[in-house]
């Protein structure tokens, strides 16, 4: 059993690492300054400039098909890249991406929505969560009523990432209440902001924030249905599933960065005439953090490997997300403790990460939902203890 990276994986990872260190990390001090002044860390033009610079290195559309100018990288490589992105808190991501379910679009829809999104000319958001339908996504209530060649949407979505800046939304709405969302009663629509929906920013404990989207008699042409009528819930689960290995991959990068900060601090900070790293309490926090970090790394890489192997990734991905999200919260908490009062200030990014990673245990599947999926798979015999090695 070979746990080593291939030459290609190592080369791609090292190239991304070099780009992040040379082009992105130098912006950290300015990003912190702006955020302390309640300003965005990066504005859209700055993000765009960085993305285009990365494109000259060949990094464009990590998951996007080659026919659209992307790299179409396997999941393991994408996981490694997301880990490198986690090494900085600068809100950077590579360009050339689009929501994975947008590739179900018709040729006309691809020209109007998919390709401009890949090229960075349009911004999208995915809207399934509602005030009464978070973890229970099948309980959505926003309705779509057929009226001639149009559908009329009424209702509200909430906690929508990127919703306040999006040019269009992928909206999952109920089209047949008797069937229910899970059984073919929900449909996905491509809805331009110009069609009349509005967004309301939601302030959170982290930097930036999601939005509520309000639909009041918004008319959407029938041609703007994404996929098929009744396919909305299935598409929604496909969209959410992508985050089950990218989120904890990012968490691994954050944990690596903050743990190194803790090691550096423990080797330089003196109290009572000795480096604090000589204290057993500090040593144990570092040891526990490294052990949990490594455990998370292999759970997450295994979940990405199942995608590349063509296996059903849901069980492995739920374990990776559950453990990875919990791990990074525990590691950041210990690192803040090691830094003491300085870690609690906004002069260092540790408290920022502390606020950021708390979301990882909630969005795109809460801890509780991951536990439900994992236990259900075992109790119903969908998988065996030991997975593919059983």
Image (spheres, rainbow, N blue to C red):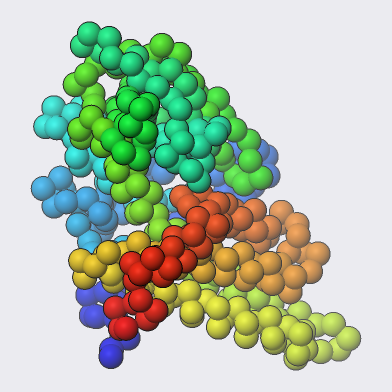
Q: Residue furthest top?
A: 148
In which quarter of the view is residue 315 placed? Answer: bottom left
Side of 70 relative to 276 (left or right):
left
Residue 235 in the image, given as x and y percentages of width and height: 29, 42
Q: In this view of the protein, which residue sits in the foreground, 50 or 179?
A: 179
As drawn, 38 above or below 27? above
- Identity of the residue drawn at 67% across and 39% down: 37
- Identity of the residue drawn at 50% across and 46% down: 135
- Identity of the residue drawn at 80% across and 82% down: 270
Side of 287 relative to 129 (left or right):
right
Q: In this view of the protein, which residue sits in the foreground, 221 or 52?
A: 221
In which quarter of the view is residue 286 placed? Answer: bottom right
As drawn, 73 above or below 255? above
- Identity of the residue drawn at 41% across and 11% down: 217
In the rendered image, which quarter contains the C terminus? bottom left
Q: In this view of the protein, which residue sits in the foreground, 294 or 71?
A: 294
What is the total number of numbered labels drawn onto the structure image?
0
Residue 190 in the image, given as x and y percentages of width and height: 29, 27
In the rendered image, which quarter contains the N terminus? bottom left
Residue 15 in the image, given as x and y percentages of width and height: 31, 68
Residue 200 in the image, given as x and y percentages of width and height: 55, 25
Q: Is residue 30 visible?
A: no
Q: Residue furthest right?
A: 272
Q: Is residue 225 visible?
A: yes
Side of 104 relative to 328 (left or right):
left
As drawn, 149 above or below 206? above
């Amino acid at each position: 059993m070979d746990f080593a990276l291939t030459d290609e994986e190592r080369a791609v990872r090292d190239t991304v690492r070099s780009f992040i260190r040379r082009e992105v990390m130098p912006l950290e001090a300015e990003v912190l300054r702006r955020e302390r002044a309640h300003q965005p860390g990066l504005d859209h033009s700055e993000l765009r400039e960085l993305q285009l610079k990365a494109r000259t290195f060949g990094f464009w559309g990590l998951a996007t098909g080659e026919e659209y100018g992307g790299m179409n990288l396997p999941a393991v490589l994408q996981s490694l890249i997301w880990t490198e992105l986690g090494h900085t808190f600068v809100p950077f991501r590579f360009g050339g991406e689009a929501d994975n379910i947008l590739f179900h679009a018709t040729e006309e829809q691809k020209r109007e929505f998919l390709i401009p999104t890949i090229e960075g000319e349009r911004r999208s958001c995915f809207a399934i969560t509602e005030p009464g339908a978070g973890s229970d996504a099948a309980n959505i209530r926003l309705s779509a009523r057929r009226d001639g060649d149009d559908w009329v949407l009424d209702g509200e979505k909430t906690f929508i990432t990127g919703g306040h800046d999006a040019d269009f939304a992928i909206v999952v709405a109920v089209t047949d209440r008797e069937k229910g969302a899970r059984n073919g009663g929900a449909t996905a629509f491509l809805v331009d902001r110009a069609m009349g929906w509005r967004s309301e920013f939601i302030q959170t404990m982290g930097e930036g924030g999601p939005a509520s989207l309000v639909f009041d008699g918004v008319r959407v042409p029938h041609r703007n249905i994404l996929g098929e009528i009744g396919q909305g819930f299935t598409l929604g689960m496909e969209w959410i599933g992508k985050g089950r290995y990218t989120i904890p991959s990012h968490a691994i990068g954050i944990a690596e960065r903050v743990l190194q900060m803790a090691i550096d601090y423990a080797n330089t900070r003196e109290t009572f005439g000795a480096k604090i790293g000589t204290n057993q309490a500090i040593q144990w926090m570092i040891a526990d953090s490294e052990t949990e970090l490594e455990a998370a790394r292999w759970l997450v890489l295994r979940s990405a490997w199942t995608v590349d192997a063509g296996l059903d990734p849901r069980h492995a991905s739920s374990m990776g997300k559950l453990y990875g999200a919990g791990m990074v919260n525990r590691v950041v908490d210990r690192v803040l403790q090691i830094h003491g009062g300085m870690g609690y200030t906004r002069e260092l990014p540790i408290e920022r990460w502390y606020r950021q990673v708390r979301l990882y245990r909630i969005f795109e599947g809460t801890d509780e939902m991951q536990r439900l999926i994992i236990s259900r798979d075992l109790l119903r015999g969908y998988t065996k203890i030991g997975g593919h090695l059983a």
